[in-house]
Image (cartoon, rainbow, N blue to C red):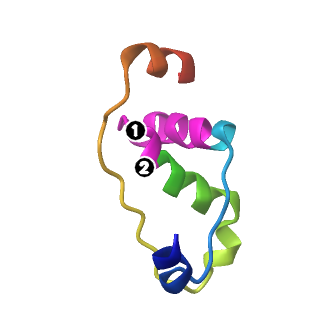
Amino acid sequence: FDLCREGVDDYILTSETEIADAIRWMANHHHKIIEGAAGVALAAFQKNPARFNSKNVAIVICGANITTPTLKVLL
């Protein structure tokens, strides 16, 4: 935790619902299945995109480590 306090300037909290919405959005708009960890980053961006106006933003979308039953619930 100390390392995070030293190296992280800001953070965005996301809910489970926002993460699920981000996973669903990626599947619907880009036909890519992503896992929850990637969904967190996307959900954080989607929560307040105006916050990133005039900034270069990269969101790392990796992994498809999500079970079929979980995916069925989300989609």
Q: Position of residue 40 (x, y in %)?
A: 53, 51
Q: Residues within 10 Å of mark 2 (few under 14, many from 20)?
A: many
Q: Which kind of residue does numbered mark 1 sit on? A: Glu
Q: Which kind of residue does numbered mark 2 sit on? A: Ala
Judged left or right of residue 68, residue 29 is: right
Q: Which residue is mark 1?
A: 35
Check if residue 23 falls in the magenta segment.
yes
User: Dot 2: what SS?
Assistant: helix
Classified by dominant secondary structure, the portion drawn in magenta counts as helix
Judged left or right of residue 33, residue 72 is: right
Report the residue that reaches farthest toward the front. 2
Residue that appears at 60% across and 59% down: 44
Of residues 1 and 69, the one drawn nearer to the viewer in this rendering: 1
Question: Relative to residue 19, is residue 1 depicted above or below?
Answer: below
Residues at circles 2 and 1 in contact by the CB criterion of under 8 Å: yes
Question: Relative to residue 32, is residue 72 depicted above or below?
Answer: above
User: Dot 1: what SS?
Assistant: loop
Residue that appears at 38% across and 39% down: 34
- The CA distance from mark 2 to mark 1 is 6 Å
Q: Which residue is mark 2?
A: 38
Q: Residues within 10 Å of mark 1 (few under 14, many from 20)?
A: many
Check if residue 37 falls in the magenta segment.
yes
Q: Position of residue 23 (x, y in %)?
A: 50, 38
Judged left or right of residue 64, residue 10 is: right
Q: Position of residue 58 (x, y in %)?
A: 41, 70
Find the magenta span and give its range: 19-38
Judged left or right of residue 54, residue 61 is: left
Of residues 5 and 14, the one drawn nearer to the viewer in this rendering: 5
Q: Position of residue 5 (x, y in %)?
A: 56, 79
